Image: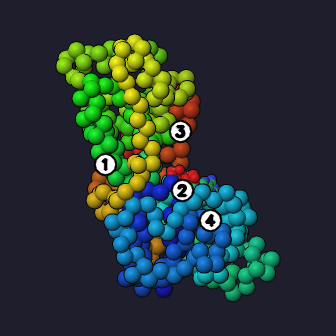
Amino acid sequence: QKNIGILTSGGDAQGMNPCVRAVVRMAIARKCRPFFIYEGYQGLVDGGDKIKQAKWTDVSGFLTSGGTMIGTARCKEFREIEGRRTGVYNLIKKGIDALVVIGGDGSLTGADKLRAEWPDHVAALEKDGRISKEDANKYRTLMIVGMVGSIDNDLASTDMTIGACSALERICESVDAILSTAMSHQRAFVVEVMGRHCGWLALNAAISTGADYLFIPEAPPKDDWEESMCKTLKASRDAGKRTSLVIVAEGALDRNLNPIKPDYIKDILSTRLGYDTRVTILGHVQRGGAPAHFDRFLGTMQGAEAIEAILRATPDTPSPVIGMLENKITTQPLKEAIELTGQVAQAIESKDFARAMALRSASFSK
Ligand code: ATP
């Protein structure tokens, strides 16, 4: 019988709650004991009542609610080796021998580090007399399973991350609302959506709302983009369209890696085309509210698979990340997924945009 801790970390995403619910209930169904770890890695470092056994009924109502009911945080201490050692101590004291982490690439990098360092931490804690020899023998390894909770859909190894579908749904609803007023007044709107390093939300929102122009970090526009944007928007207006819509990812860049900001785009459209142009920054509304059907489904399927992955694992099994590729729930080495994701950022930094796009597409179809 395993004791399985579960935490949510990094930015919240709709669908984290359904995932937590599935982990708790599948653990109980498979005769394990689930434990909530509240406030992400902060709860791991704080220990005490931040780590608490979860009952079946503790996750009632989780399926339909947004955010994360067990809390999330950015935890500085966990980035340091001493913080992670305290986390190891707290897990051992609670008798936890497997950990499920739902978070973005930072959270999963931290999880992978914790697992790799685990034997050294155990040895050091035993040496310092903080844990007994018996405990040191009993808790030789920690199994960690990751799931990607991120509205950005920015991690390799999965076609969809938990929360991305709900965020896209929210963006489309908001842009639809903007378009009805824009059309009445023949206005242009520049809408900023989330996505610091990944243009998935912006790209899909642009396709789904019929945007005229799009800016994403992986594919910066040509140097004369101001001219080309104005031409494109004017051609649409000349053809009878009453509105103009530009979607910008918050991390959009030009070819020199300078940010492209909505206010600058607005100024171009106002001064060069004379359009009455407004900026809307959608902000946190994108990550709020109830999860869409798909995130409830994805969170549930992946949460159930996380428990199976823990029960299948041997001490030598690399930490897996649960994903979904071509409609099938998958299990892949966490390290590889993080490395592949990091390569996209590196390609952008080195201005190899063709490679950034190729890697992004490969990570969805792999
Ligand atoms: P989001 O995509 O929403 O930003 P994230 O998981 O990438 O989510 P981060 O803030 O990068 O969010 O990470 C969340 C937490 O994970 C950090 O506050 C820290 O505690 C831990 N963490 C992140 N990166 C590392 C790392 N390299 N080593 C150890 N811990 C880390």
Whether pointer 4 and pointer 1 mark residues with C-beta atoms closer than 8 Å, the reply is: no
Which one is closest to the eye, mark 1 or mark 3?
1
Specify few, some or many for label 2: CA neighbours under 10 Å numbering under 14, 14-19, or 20 or more. many
Q: Which mark is residue 345?
A: 3
Q: Earlier in the sequence, mark 4 or mark 1?
A: 4
Which structural element holds mark 2?
Answer: loop
- Residue 359 lies left or right of residue 52; in this view the side is left
User: Real-space Cα distance between discs 3 and 4?
Assistant: 27 Å
Classify residue 177 by image quadrant: top left
- Total numbered labels: 4
Residue holding disc 1: 169
Q: Earlier in the sequence, mark 2 or mark 3?
A: 2
Q: Nearer the viewer, residue 312 or 162?
A: 162
User: Real-space Cα distance between discs 2 and 1?
Assistant: 21 Å
Residue holding disc 2: 10
Q: Residue at x 33, y 14 (%)?
A: 231
Q: Nearer the viewer, residue 39 or 96?
A: 39
